[in-house]
Amino acid sequence: MIHRKLSFVAAIGLIAASALLGAAPAHADETETEPPVVELVLDVSGSMKAADIDGETRMVVAKRAFNDVVDALPETTQLGIRVLGATYGGKNKKLGCQDTQQIVKVGQVNRVAAKNAIATLQPTGFTPIGLALRSAAKDLEGAGAARRIVLITDGEDTCTPPDPCDVARQLAAQGTDLVVDTLGLAPDEKTRKQLVCVAQATGGTYASAQSEEELTDRIKQLVDRAAKPVPVTPAVVAGAKDCATAPLLDAGVYTDRELIGEHRFYRVAVAGDQELRASVSIALDRPLNRDYGILLKAATVDGRELVRGVDAGSGRSDVLSAGLRWSLTRDDEEEEEDGTAKKSTDTVCLVVSNSFASATAARAPGMPVELSIDVVAASQAPDAPGLGRGWLLLFVLALAGLVAGVLAGWLTRWWVAKWGVN
């Protein structure tokens, strides 16, 4: 969400266990050897008949681009193909908005079967994008740890509900490692906004194509991206409404959901010789009213604020971030009987809150949150130079007085000698 994207997400453990024992950060090592799993979702609605790409219809150009992509796929690729608006050409919207089929099941790429399935497609009916996305997610269930949907369409959904943006948010909220990339074929502004929304909600990307060459290059890029493992796999965690019941977290990367105007609490154990470093990113996956922001702060268990986070400056307009650093100060440290500092361990509460106001009535699921936590050796700032204590302080003050007196006397004699005035 922030972003990913920053691209992250996977589920580990039980929330109850993480609250008691601390959730261990997950890793993406296991996904590095898995083959890419991708399902291409192609719009075959009636608008694909338009002959406005290099003098040919959008459907003809899309078919050739698909064939080029299939030829370039690695042998290990797990590929599926789903279409929408491909079979029903009537005017009954209820029937037309159910028109989506998987024409190639997810499995090791079979180039001949894939090309034959694509060759038979003819522009036909409505554009049920939301339903097609939901169905594509089901096609990919159990297909691998990292899954990708590549949606290619030339128009906005004509069958809402379900709204494609809402479907994308629901898929992301399930905590599964599913990313939707969108590609607009000669899109208008409404289509562009809808496809951007779908991509942002799942941590995917949006691109547009105005020519056959652009379309082929974009699809290849998106399919190739599915082969690359994500750098970090965050653990799914559920923040609490107060610190007492908040999950205890170790260093790592976590993903959660936060409703508009909500506060989410997490706990972190920080020893006296350690420093807590934390950051939070929230992806803006829906329209929001102006003047919004996020806040990350560290507090004690009883609610005393320790430090507030500052804007991390991600540079992205679709992600808000904040970060903080905190360690025990000398005033906070307890002393042993011999006067030395006791290396105690503090439980610090991290609080994530927001000042969002939704531009629509939708509230759930919450905004996607990514929380990064690290606990390192403390790096206390050096003390400011002091004047010392006792005889050293007396000597410094006497020396300063002597120098000041000599300078004052010398300046007075010079003034009298030059101007004759005392």
Image (spheres, rainbow, N blue to C red):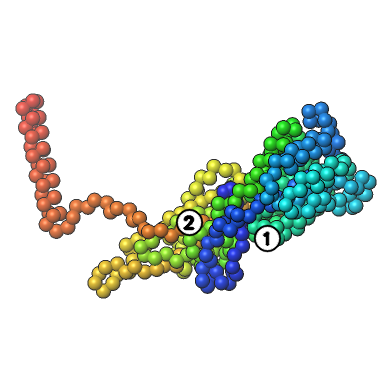
Task: From the viewer's side, name the closer residue of 87 and 243.
Answer: 87
Contact between labelled residues 2 and 1, with CB atoms less than 8 Å apart: no
Q: Amino acid at mark 2?
A: Ala
| Residue 232, image x, y percentages | 55, 54
Q: Secondary structure at mark 1?
A: loop
Above or below, 23 relative to 159:
below
Which residue has dot 2 on it? 278
The three-letter amino acid code for the residue at tag 1 is: Gln
Q: Quadrant of the C terminus?
A: top left
Q: Nearer the viewer, mark 1 or mark 2?
A: 1
Q: Which element carries disc 2, helix, strand or loop?
A: strand
Residue 151 visible? The answer is yes
Residue located 59% across and 54% down the image: 32
Residue 367 shows in the view: no
Q: Which residue is mark 1?
A: 174
User: In terms of depth relative to the viewer, which is nearer, 4 or 239?
Assistant: 4
Percent across and percent down for residue 149 are: 71, 49
